[in-house]
Amino acid sequence: MKDYSRREFIKVSAGSAAFLGLAGLGCIPGMIPGGKKKNILFIAVDDLRPQLGCYGNSEVISPHIDDLARSGLLFKRAYCQQAICSPSRISLLTGLRCESTRIYGLEHRKKDYLPDIISLPQHFRNNGYETVSIGKVYHHSDDDPTAWSRGSFRAMKGSGYVTDDAMTLVEENRRTNPNAGTKGPATEAADVADNVYSDGKLADRAIEEIRMLKDKPFFLALGFRKPHLPFTAPKRYWDLYNPDAFELADNPFPPMGATPYTMNNYGELRNYYGMPRGKKRVEDDLARHLIHGYHACVSFIDAQIGRVVAELEAQGLRDRTIIVLWGDHGWKLGEHDSWCKHTNFEIDTNAPLLISAPGMANLGQSTEALTEFVDIYPTLCELTGLPKPDHLEGISFTPLMENPHIDWKKAAFSIWVAQKYRYDEEIQVIGFTMKTDRYRYTEWKHTRTGEVRARELYDHRIDPDENINAIDDPEYAAIVPQLEAQMAQGWRAALPDSIE
């Protein structure tokens, strides 16, 4: 466990984000006492694992996110609909599952494929809110332009390096790697102020917007890029950690019984300068360095979140602002001898989600209820008193904010489309995965014929890290047909019994 003085270093540098005075007011849809509309601060964090202090991890230094969790409700089992940036974000922002959006790759935009679907920010704009996009909200800065009151703001150019040495390696990488693009080294630790890096600039811009918007109802979407690769953050965040203290993943191997579709080759990481090419594994010393970089970036983003929430408090807006924080999907740090996202594992599809709202009860609690990112859109509608569009495929989780322990969904659903199929005119195989209370069950299905090419079954009661595909284990012979039937019934049948 880290020395508290180092944890306090970040907390003091950004200002405390704690706000614990919301209990007892009662959730009033749409309005707060005085008749003013509730604001929305909508924080997205790229590639963020549920590896934070508030999730029980004592190694990572995340005091401001932890403070935010203490002022709201934390969701331990929240799932994205696909573990890749653009499809995950478009699904969340439209309230549609990926089977409905049919958006599977990074190149696809909401504005091209779903122009008539009213997105979450557009719905708020249509109902009198000033809607502002800062940073990576959609994958593409020019997506969904009708959703925003003015043009989106992005601070990052290229891969966001700030040192001449890193830029030199970008050019060197281009000479030897045709897929390099703007990728140079996988890490950078410049001894600079926070706002020399793009995510610090985003926090600066969000603070400016809060000061300008304080007298208007607003939906402020703030998308931080880190801890996405490359792991670039000011040196002081790297210095918070002992680089020799990081433990490597304890399951550096594919699952026993992995299917031909289960794994990927983490090409996202391999295209950075100095990373192993082909199918070579990441050696232990490099793995520790990458893990160090990931942690430094999480602490860097945590400090920026602290700055923004502190500004809400300074402007007297904290008690009339709903804050929702989410990571667009999970991320691997050597688990299954793999890196990045882009698989159907629990570690890819399970991501952080927390919400803090004026008047909510049960501050600082967490819920084990199965929730999905498509549920965020209807929840924010309900909390602000806006009507819910008919196209939504999630449900409001406000009942969990009143009682985190009630019976809820019977399953959460995600998909994965392997890279080699994603841009084909006819996608051939999709992995449909279902997380129940105990199991993760996946069917790799041929989209034209409906034939199931392979299956996976992981028993989280005895195998939470998903190291054994138990699909052919005779012990589970009776449960497999039950899971197959439940999968066929789909997400509607998995809704809580209280929901029609």
Image (cartoon, rainbow, N blue to C red):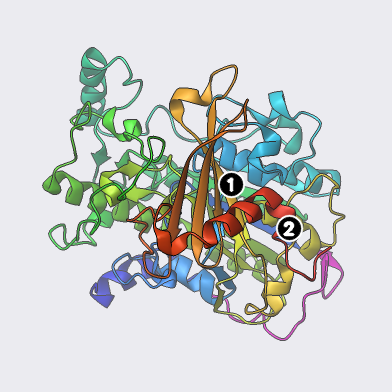
Q: Sequence-wise, which precedes: disc 1 or disc 2?
A: 1
Q: Which residues are magenta?
A: 18-37
Q: Residue at x 74, y 30 (%)?
A: 114
How many numbered discs? 2
Q: Is residue 130 above or below residue 306?
A: above
- SS of the residue under disc 1: loop
Quadrant occupied by the C terminus: bottom right
Residue 186 magenta-drawn? no
Real-space Cα distance between discs 1 and 2?
17 Å
Q: Is residue 74 left or right of residue 9?
A: right
Q: Is residue 135 above or below residue 142?
A: below
Q: Nearer the viewer, mark 1 or mark 2?
A: 2
- SS of the residue under disc 2: helix
Rendered image quadrant of residue 237: bottom left
Instruction: Choose between 115 and 232: the one closer to the eye.
Output: 115
Q: Which residue is mark 1?
A: 81
Rendered location of residue 281, percent (x, y): 19, 38
Residue 24 magenta-drawn? yes
- What amino acid is found at the position of numbered circle 2 in the picture? Ala
- In the picture, the disc for residue 493 is 2
Rendered location of residue 55, percent (x, y): 43, 70
Q: Is residue 380 above or below residue 423?
A: below
Rendered location of residue 409, percent (x, y): 66, 65
